[in-house]
Every structure is written in structure tokens, then in C-alpha cells.
Image: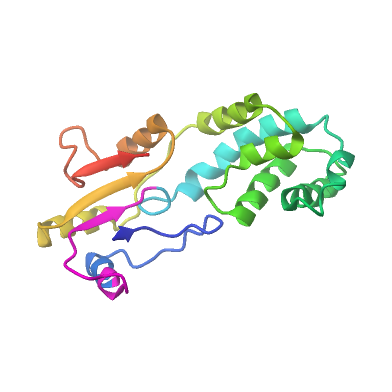
């Protein structure tokens, strides 16, 4: 089973986090056919509020790169492709509101709009490179800028440690895993700051932490 919040457009709506709620939800699953052997937790927007604390500053950094790069790309180059290319249509609609100029504010809107259209794991910067016919250097610059945003002022949701401790105490037969995707050093820094793998006891909460 996976204990995670589905992020549709970075929807961080809270769900019932208690151990009994987690196990009951798994048992109600139509795919359940036997005893629960493991619970797999996602990290971002599941154990802490990633969107509210980290996404906006990171997007701001990337928006500065996008605005600098696209400032010399005329809107006319995109308008002819809007009917066949949904992404181009989204970009044209946003840039028209900014008189055809890709400002930092426009770049922030572009990132949010593409993610809303295609989902939270969509490769936004690759798509911008495709639409504007930019090279891989643009993508790398955007990603580097995004990941340069400092990781600070983050904390697990109030019920996380209690939930994990209760699961381990009341259900010692369960294997607890933490699985997250992203740049390894950045994800490991989040895990460290959140106290989910304390140096004095790395397996206090999870038998294994996987960063993909």
C-alpha cells in the first residue's frame, strides 16, 4: 500500500493520517488480497507541506532564467502553432496578458499552467525547450536554478511522528518504507531536516529510504 496524497495541480488537501485510517483504507482497496505487509510513504506533500514551503521559491528562481531566455522570442513565432500544439496555446494565452513579454510573473504563470495541464511530474522545462526550440542548456539552467532554492523552514505535519511511532509499536510486523523522487542530494537534505532519518538511529521510522 502507498500512504500518499495524490497531487493534482499540487493539491495538498489533508487526509486521515492516523494508523488505523491508513490500514483501513488499504483493507478497503479492491486490490487487497491478503495481510498487509508494508506501508510505503511518499515524502513531498505527504509528510510535510512541500508546495507551501519550497515550490514557490524554487519556481521563482527558475522563472528568472525563463524570463531572461524568452525575452527575445517574439510571440508571433508561437501563434501559428497553437491549433496543433496545446502547450503553445497555453503559452500564447499567458504571454498575451503581458503584452507578449515573458516577465518573471509570466514565467511563474507558465510553470503553474503547464503543470496543471499535464500533471505534477510533467517536465515543464523540457516542454518549454521544445516549444521555443531551445537546447538542453536551457533545461539544465532552469533545473539548476530550481534546485538552488534553499531548503529551510520545513517541518513534518503535526501527526507524522505520532503516526509512525504508533505503527511501529502496534504493528511491529509491518515494513515501513519512505520512497521519494528527485535530485538525491536535495531529497536527502529534506529528509535530514525533517528528522525522518536521525543520524543516531537512521532506521528509527523506516526500514528503508529510497530516493529515485
Residue 197 vs 88, above or below: the answer is: above
Does residue 71 belong to the magenta stretch? no
Q: Nearer the viewer, residue 116 or 152?
A: 116
Q: Quadrant of the C terminus?
A: top left
- In the foreground, 109 or 90: 90
Q: Is residue 162 left or right of residue 75?
A: left
Specify the quadrant that holds the N terminus: bottom left
Whether residue 195 is visible here, answered yes or no, is: no
Q: Is residue 103 left or right of residue 35?
A: right
In the picture, measured across the screen, residue 175 lies left or right of residue 140, that is left
Q: Is residue 14 above or below residue 141?
A: below
Which span is picked out in magenta?
Answer: 25-43
Q: Residue 195 at what x, y percent from top left?
A: 27, 41
Q: Is residue 36 above or below residue 102?
A: below
- In this view, the residue in front, 159 or 47, is 47
Identity of the residue furthest to the top in this view? 137
Q: Quadrant of residue 57?
A: top right
x%, y% of residue 43? 36, 48
Above or below: residue 172 compared with residue 67: below
Task: Name the residue at 83% across, 29% down.
Answer: 72
Q: Residue 61 occupies which quadrant of the picture?
A: top right
Percent x, y of residue 110: 69, 46
Residue 90 vs residue 164: left or right?
Answer: right
Residue at 89% across, 41% down = 76
Q: Residue drawn 41% across and 59% down?
A: 5
Counting labels gives 0
The residue located at (34%, 68%) in the rendering is 16
The answer, for residue 39, to whether it is visible in the render is: yes
Q: How is the image coloured?
A: rainbow
Amino acid at each position: 500500500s502507498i500512504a500518499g496524497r495524490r497531487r493534482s495541480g499540487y493539491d495538498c488537501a489533508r487526509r486521515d493520517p492516523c494508523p488505523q485510517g491508513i490500514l483501513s483504507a488499504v483493507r478497503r482497496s479492491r486490490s487487497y488480497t491478503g495481510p498487509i505487509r508494508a506501508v510505503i510513504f511518499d515524502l513531498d506533500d505527504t509528510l510535510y507541506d512541500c508546495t507551501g514551503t519550497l515550490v514557490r521559491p524554487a519556481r521563482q528562481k527558475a522563472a528568472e532564467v525563463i524570463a531572461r531566455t524568452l525575452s527575445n522570442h517574439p510571440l508571433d513565432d508561437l501563434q501559428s502553432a497553437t491549433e496543433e500544439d496545446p502547450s503553445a496555446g497555453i503559452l500564447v494565452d499567458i504571454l498575451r496578458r503581458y503584452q507578449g513579454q515573458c516577465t518573471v510573473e509570466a514565467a511563474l504563470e507558465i510553470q503553474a499552467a503547464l503543470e496543471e495541464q499535464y500533471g505534477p511530474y510533467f517536465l515543464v522545462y523540457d516542454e518549454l525547450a521544445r516549444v521555443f526550440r531551445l537546447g538542453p542548456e536551457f533545461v539544465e539552467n532552469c533545473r539548476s536554478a530550481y534546485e538552488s532554492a534553499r531548503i529551510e523552514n520545513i517541518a513534518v505535519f503535526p501527526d507524522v511522528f505520532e503516526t509512525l511511532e504508533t505503527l511501529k509499536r502496534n504493528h511491529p510486523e509491518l515494513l515501513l518504507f519512505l520512497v521519494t523522487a528527485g535530485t538525491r542530494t536535495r531529497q536527502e537534505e529534506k529528509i535530514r531536516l525533517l528528522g525522518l532519518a536521525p543520524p543516531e538511529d537512521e532506521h528509527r521510522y523506516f526500514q528503508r529510504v529510497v530516493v529515485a
